[in-house]
Amino acid sequence: MLILKSRKYLNMKLKIYLGFAVAIVLAGIASCSTDVDINAPYETTAVVYGFVEPIEDTQYVKINRTYLGDGNNAEYAAINDSTMFESVEGTVDKIVNGTVQESYPLEELWVNDIEEGMFYTDSQKVFYWVPTSGIDDQATYQLNINVNEGEKVVTAETEVVGFVNFKQNFRNKVVNTNGVSFANTAAVGQNVYNDLGIEWGVAENGKRYQVKLVFNYEEHTATDTTMRSISTTLGSVVGQSADIDFFQNYNGENFYAFVENRLKNDPNEANIIKRVAHGLEFHIIVADENLHTYMEVNEPATGIVNERPIFTNISNGFGLFASRNTTILDERNLSGDPIFLSLNSERELVFGPYTQDLKFCSKYFPTDPVIGCQ
């Protein structure tokens, strides 16, 4: 189901877009040498970041401008108007076989409670558009931006990343009635761990694939029960062919080490009575070739040369308009029941060396005398 995300989600996405944009805007700040008159005529450039994501019902675009002040440009960064155009109008066109089928207007949205940083954090303007009929994975989407009533016209386009198919061999391992087997720990002190091979097929227009595991659990205190989630990235792979499937191995011991690492210093630990494993989610996050190239160009430099090229697919501006998509496997049957841990995997969670102090018990095996929740 596609749902409109909360303000927290919008803030997270805005942080991503700002993170992309900071390098470009700061490049404009840092590019002035001591031999350049900073008061000379300066041409403002549009900095645009947006993604077309089929899993989302609302799509977002961040539109800013480079700036140059008379003094310390880092100080100007804290002034919201420094990075905003006076007026911005735009559309996103859905194009099929060279013909515009639908056109969606860009709407303004002010997002508050942004995390502190170099740039203005009281509020930030983003733009959004709503594809009323959903994202068509056979279409091309063209972004059209009119800045300051025709002063600048900025365009970009992207094809759409499709969903992946989890291979049946993997699905059989995680949706079976026995649960996911990360461990074969039948008794205290055994600690036998199993590998899990995650297998999936190629996504249309996909280039880079990232695998993420989400662990959902209940946290019980004397007064409340709260659903919590923690996640970890299992790895990423770049597609080299359009017809080769992918495989990512994950060692079960790493799962318990991950849970321990994320929960061992919980500031609320003294108030927690018990934790109850709820379910697992497997996410495949796919980037198109443009986003892959952008990420590749902007990876940390490992050599002695720090200078790197700037990649953009924005016409008459800088930035990126690309597609990414996420396929999620989180249910084991048509009733929507979550993917759960096997009996021995839950035993390892309850009394294994990594997580034995985290107060886990099992609701899926309540009659087990050792691990069942009482």
Image (cartoon, rainbow, N blue to C red):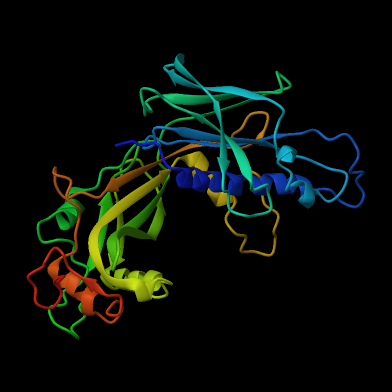
Side of 41 where 60 appears, left or right? left
Position of residue 191 relative to residue 214, above or below, is below
Residue located 15% across and 65% down the image: 342
Inspect this view and state whether residue 175 appears.
Answer: yes
Side of 368 where 65 appears, left or right? right
Residue located 37% across and 59% down the image: 231
**Residue 136 appears at what percent x and percent y?**
37, 26
Q: Nearer the viewer, residue 236 or 281?
A: 281
Inspect this view and state whether residue 260 appears.
Answer: no
Residue farthest toward the left in the current orientation of the protein: 367
Position of residue 333 relative to residue 275, above or below, is above
Position of residue 22 relative to residue 100, above or below, is below
Corner quadrant of residue 79: top right
**Residue 190 appears at what percent x and percent y?**
18, 83
Residue farthest toward the front in the current orientation of the protein: 223
**Residue 6 appears at what percent x and percent y?**
43, 42
**Quarter of the figure that contains the N terminus:** top left
Residue farthest toward the bottom in the current orientation of the protein: 189
Side of 82 where 203 appears, left or right? left
